[in-house]
Amino acid sequence: MSTNEITCLIVDDHEVVREGLRLSLSRAPHIRVIGEASDGADAISLVERRKPDVVVMDVAMPMLNGLEATRQILKNRPGTKVLVLTSYGDDDCVAQLMRAGASGYLIKQTAANDLLKAIREGNPTHLAVAFDEEAKAARAAIYSEYKATRTAPPGDLTPQFPLVRRVLEAMRVPAIGFPGYEADDVIATLTRRARAQGWEVVIVTGDKDLMQMVDGSVRSYDSMYEKWYGPKEVEEKWGVPPAQLADLLALIGDKIDNIPGVPGVGEKTAVKLLAQFGTVDRLYENLALVPGKLRETLAAHRKQALLSRELATVSRQVPIDFDLEAFRLREPDWPRLRALWMEMEFTRLLKELPAQTVEETLRTAGGDILRHVELFDLYQGEQIPAGKKSLAYALTFQAEDRSLTEEEVLQLYQRIQQHAAAALGAAPRRRPWFAHGRPSWPGGSSPEPRGISRTGSTVRRRSGASGSSIACRSRSTAMRPSPAGS
């Protein structure tokens, strides 16, 4: 082991996240991943056995959360560095972990982050996102073993695809696919058509196959490594220009997609052959010029080489509708997007959205059953405007009663209260106490709280000719001590 080597342990309950981290860290020359765990309790045991230099650990996990696991790890092995992994950028949570001894934190990269970053930094006028739809069908029809070596996607990845589509709908970004074709083929077709109309194109992907499309007016951007690829960068990476990339894969194959190539032909040999002959077709037309055993190998696998090139070539002719105006970048549906970020607990992304009044925020959090919200600053005696903080506030809201159970009422109230506290920089000092029909307070009944530092709530059901509703009223404060005698 190198004296400069850093050993690392990855802890996250999602396999796809661990896989992505492992792949990223494996590219760092002095970092070696020596183990993985899916929950905090296993992480503590594994740290004791493997003694890593660094633990990269999710903030929220089963068995033992990131905060408690961090405390235990640093208690047992004080020299270990802990990096917290979070998708929210939750300042309070991160601050707690830092106080517990964590050395820093990492923000998980999400599809939403990638898309927002592409819009913010690329400033496109038109945008679309492509999906696979029965993607193997077209290529599997000519080669049944295409992608046959790929394992099934992690179990927690598949349920995320509908969430990605919901995000795209809220952002009003078209999601495009065509049955039987891969997303690469759809992107290549859209790129060709846009170029035919004189547009410059940026393809945001980490997939090497789409580098075939790169030219003077088409660039590729790998968001994971924040690297741009023009014709020069593609040739530096692969040894051939973009136009020869499919020919290169025809000779060397592709283990990821199970494209066979020509056995025994490596990348250096293939690059030399293409430098001499230009394409696989011209190579076979002039096969007599290739010396010795290599000529015999190429001759024996001619059919396989041509098949491999067909498999590796992205289709530019997917029969898909093309209306450039449909891809024009539009203003997102902000309330819908805000509701999604709240649902997914993407606190950092929430902070990047345009300012709302607190009432608008709460209506978004409550969904379509919320009918009325009032929020007053208890010291100023006025409604709280957008962007203003409050040390003490009173919250009242009404919602339709769609035969909600008591537990559903509780969940609705907690959701509204949580977002009110987050928006105002305050939080209830105690857990809200619920009663149907009359106020109720922790520790016994009281007609009214004597000081505003005490948290209380009332939930009432009302029925009448016009239907039913639920009314909820709450008081909350933080950071200010109770008045004497309260």
Image (spheres, rainbow, N blue to C red):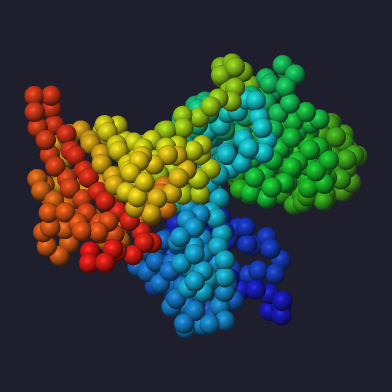
Is 83 drawn above or below residue 411 in the view shown? Answer: below
Residue at 46 percent of width and 60 percent of height: 92
Q: Is residue 199 left or right of residue 291?
A: left
Across and down, in percent, residue 145 comes to 55, 41
The answer to whether one can see residue 138 in this image is no
Q: Viewer-proximal residue, 124 or 414? A: 414
Is 23 drawn above or below residue 438 in the view shown? Answer: below
Q: Viewer-proximal residue, 296 or 435? A: 435
Is 85 drawn above or below residue 185 in the view shown? Answer: below
Residue at 68 percent of width and 74 percent of height: 5
Across and down, in percent, residue 70 comes to 46, 73
Residue at 11 percent of width and 35 percent of height: 462
User: Dividing the picture into quarters, in which one does residue 357 lie?
Assistant: top left
The answer to whether one can see residue 227 in this image is yes
Across and down, in percent, residue 127 comes to 60, 28
Q: Quadrant of the N terminus?
A: bottom right
Image mark count: 0
Q: Quadrant of the C terminus?
A: bottom left
Q: Is residue 22 left or right of residue 482?
A: right
Q: Viewer-proximal residue, 54 or 292? A: 54
Residue at 69 percent of width and 40 percent of height: 221
User: Dividing the picture into quarters, in which one does residue 26 lie?
Assistant: bottom right
Across and down, in percent, residue 477 comes to 33, 56
Q: Viewer-proximal residue, 306 or 102? A: 102
Q: Is residue 161 left or right of residue 418?
A: right
User: Dividing the picture into quarters, in which one does residue 463 lie?
Assistant: top left
